[in-house]
Image (cartoon, rainbow, N blue to C red):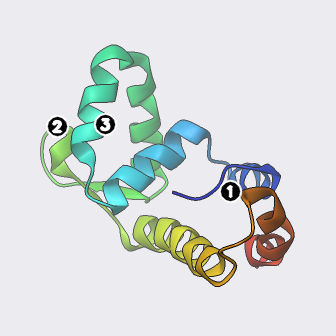
Amino acid sequence: MIAIGTPFINLLNKDELNLTQYCVLYCYAYDKVYLLEEYFKKNKEDIKHVKSLIERNYLDISDGTKLTNITPTHKCISYIKDLVDSYADIKAENILSDDDDMFDLIDDLYKD
């Protein structure tokens, strides 16, 4: 998962996503729906974020209302994997840097 800091929060704000929605997208992009099922057992009200992501074409529902019937769209996979993979690539090239030092390096990436 990507480091959570000011550039990341600014990106979510720009894309009109909240942290729950980001986590939902992440779980679908990386096939971790079982984590969402566990989370939504105790946080039933947050399921509304899944509907919003379907309406915004990040997720697609094929049949029924189960979380497992929902699939990530190209928009979801691209959004999440571009962020996570590019952060991982930058971090791998700068292994001695801590996450605070990474903000300057990834700030331009987020702007793109």
**Compared with residue 18, is residue 27 higher up or lower down, i.e. above or below?**
below
Q: Amino acid at mark 3?
A: Leu
Residue 6 image label: none
x and y percent of residue 44 in the render? 35, 18
Give the residue at mark 2: 66
* Residue lying farthest to the left in this orientation: 63
Q: Amino acid at mark 2?
A: Lys
Instruction: Tell which of 70 and 11 is nearer to you.
Output: 11
Q: CA distance from mark 2 to mark 1?
A: 26 Å
Check whether the beta carbons of the residues at disc 3 and disc 2 lie within 8 A of each other: no
Residue 36 image label: 3
> Comparing marks 3 and 2, which lies closer to the viewer?
3
Asked if residue 111 lies left or right of residue 79, the reply is right
Q: Amino acid at mark 1?
A: Asp
Instruction: Tell which of 24 and 32 is nearer to you.
Output: 32
Task: Give the SS element for disc 3.
Answer: helix
- Within-10-Å neighbours for mark 2: few <14, some 14–19, many 20+: few
* Residue lying farthest to the bottom in this orientation: 93
